[in-house]
Image: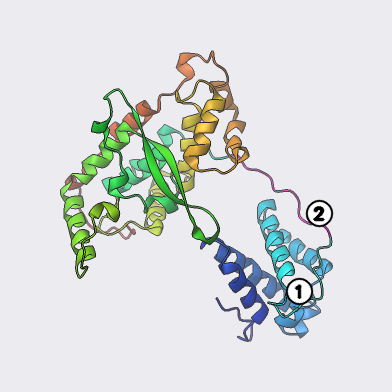
């Protein structure tokens, strides 16, 4: 990633810093760091003093007062406390790197002489409450069963949008291997949420109704035909054929190709717009959180909180505890003597969504509607 100033000259220090961080951050974090550094460079270019010199020179003169001015400039633009803290974190990392030998000792010393933050403590926002009724309304405004199934799957399992495309057909549990009374099954997830995009494996919960919906999709002529083409394409020219179980995705797009993160974002956003809903893929995950907290999985909310932490893949219980700050949830499940009517059976939720939103793909016209599939 190359940084250029307004005269299209390479900003070597900014470029070097982002390259330095690239091997230590996830693929999603790198553009975020780059954008923050680019904003700092742009600020220095219009600074009343540093605008007279090249950005690289300005970076070697970074002081605490200049950094404070930059953060005030960001605040004046309307950035919230979480964003401002993100800028400060990035600049702190930059100031640690600049005095190093790798950076050519560009800065004489780190201007952050203490651990005290310059920015206010970020305000923790409550996870958005997404109900079953909202999910049904969203799904009813989607054009294809493939889209409705994937959105339902995200709500049922709590997977991140980046994890959906990694689910293989062979990962979906086989209900026939369990007693008919079993309503929930383990789903093993290849999650990516960390430095250098390392794979963090975990297990979440998938309902019987959700598996039934997925199986209907896997038995459709569209999936069977598309899967056959993918297998033939994958194995062509390979000396030793690899089992489809090792690579065949559980979900394909309407064109029969691997489903991408951008495609999921697009069809959820477009359906939300048609339904006049303020909902995103991540809010479906929040909905999973509230559903599990109110569910019959544990005897108390604490039990469900621990189950939820594992299902969502949170490293810290404090992250999961954010879901308990909603009064409605706390009132619904807070003790061993919870009234039975306050307990939500998640398999019933899943079945209700399935019953009200399922429409077989073969009954729909497969035509492009100007929306990425």
What residue is pinned by disc 1?
99
Label 1 neighbourhood size at 10 Å, few (<14), some (14-19), many (20+)? some
In screen coordinates, is 222 left or right of 78? left
Identify the image's colour scheme: rainbow, by chain, secondary structure or one colour. Answer: rainbow
> Is the residue 25 above or below the residue 348 in the image?
below
Distance between mark 2 and mark 1 Cα atoms: 20 Å
Q: Nearer the viewer, mark 2 or mark 1?
A: 1
The one of 185 and 270 positioned closer to us in this rendering: 185
Secondary structure beneath label 1: loop
> Is the residue 360 above or below the residue 294 in the image?
below
Q: Main secondary structure of the magenta part?
A: loop
Which segment did they paint magenta?
Answer: 114-126
In screen coordinates, is 100 left or right of 168? right
What residue is pinned by disc 2?
116
Q: Residue at x 58, y 64 (%)?
A: 24
Label 2 neighbourhood size at 10 Å, few (<14), some (14-19), many (20+)? few
The one of 201 and 34 positioned closer to us in this rendering: 201
> Which comes sooner in the sequence, label 2 or label 1?
1
Q: Position of residue 365 (x, y in %)?
A: 19, 52
Q: Is residue 11 magenta?
A: no
Q: Residue at x 50, y 38 (%)?
A: 310
Secondary structure beneath label 2: loop
Q: Residue at x 43, y 45 (%)?
A: 159
Q: Position of residue 67 (x, y in %)?
A: 78, 66
In screen coordinates, is 179 left or right of 108? left
Q: Position of residue 347 (x, y in %)?
A: 36, 28
């Amino acid at each position: 990633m190359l940084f250029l100033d307004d005269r299209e000259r390479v900003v070597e220090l900014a470029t070097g810093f982002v390259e330095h961080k690239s091997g230590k951050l996830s693929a999603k974090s790198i553009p975020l760091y780059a954008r923050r550094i680019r904003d700092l460079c742009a600020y220095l270019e219009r600074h009343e003093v540093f605008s007279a010199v090249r950005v690289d020179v300005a970076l070697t003169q970074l002081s605490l007062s200049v950094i404070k001015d930059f953060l005030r400039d960001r605040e004046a633009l309307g950035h919230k406390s979480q964003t401002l803290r993100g800028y400060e974190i990035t600049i702190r990392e930059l100031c640690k790197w600049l005095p190093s030998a790798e950076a050519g000792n560009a800065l004489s010393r780190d201007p952050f002489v203490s651990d005290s933050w310059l920015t206010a403590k970020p305000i923790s926002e409550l996870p958005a409450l997404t109900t079953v009724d909202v999910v049904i309304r969203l799904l009813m405004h989607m054009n294809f069963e493939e889209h409705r199934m994937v959105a339902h799957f995200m709500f049922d399992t709590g997977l991140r949008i980046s994890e959906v495309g990694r689910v293989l057909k062979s990962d979906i549990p086989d209900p026939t291997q369990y007693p008919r009374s079993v309503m929930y099954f383990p789903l093993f997830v290849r999650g990516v949420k960390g430095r250098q995009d390392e794979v963090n494996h975990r297990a979440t919960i998938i309902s019987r109704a959700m598996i039934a919906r997925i199986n209907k999709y896997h038995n459709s002529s569209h999936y069977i035909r598309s899967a056959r083409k993918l297998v033939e394409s994958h194995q062509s020219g390979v000396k030793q054929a690899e089992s489809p179980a090792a690579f065949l995705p559980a979900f394909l797009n309407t064109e029969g190709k691997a489903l991408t993160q951008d495609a999921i974002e697009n069809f959820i956003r477009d359906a939300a717009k048609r339904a006049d809903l303020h909902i995103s893929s991540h809010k479906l995950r929040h909905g999973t959180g509230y559903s599990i907290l109110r569910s019959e999985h544990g005897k108390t909310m604490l039990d469900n909180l621990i189950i939820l932490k594992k299902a969502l893949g949170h490293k810290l219980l404090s992250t999961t505890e954010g879901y308990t700050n909603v009064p409605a949830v706390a009132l619904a499940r807070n003790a061993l003597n919870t009234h039975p009517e306050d307990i939500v059976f998640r398999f019933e939720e899943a079945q209700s969504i399935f019953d009200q939103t399922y429409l077989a793909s073969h009954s729909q016209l497969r035509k492009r509607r100007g929306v990425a599939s």
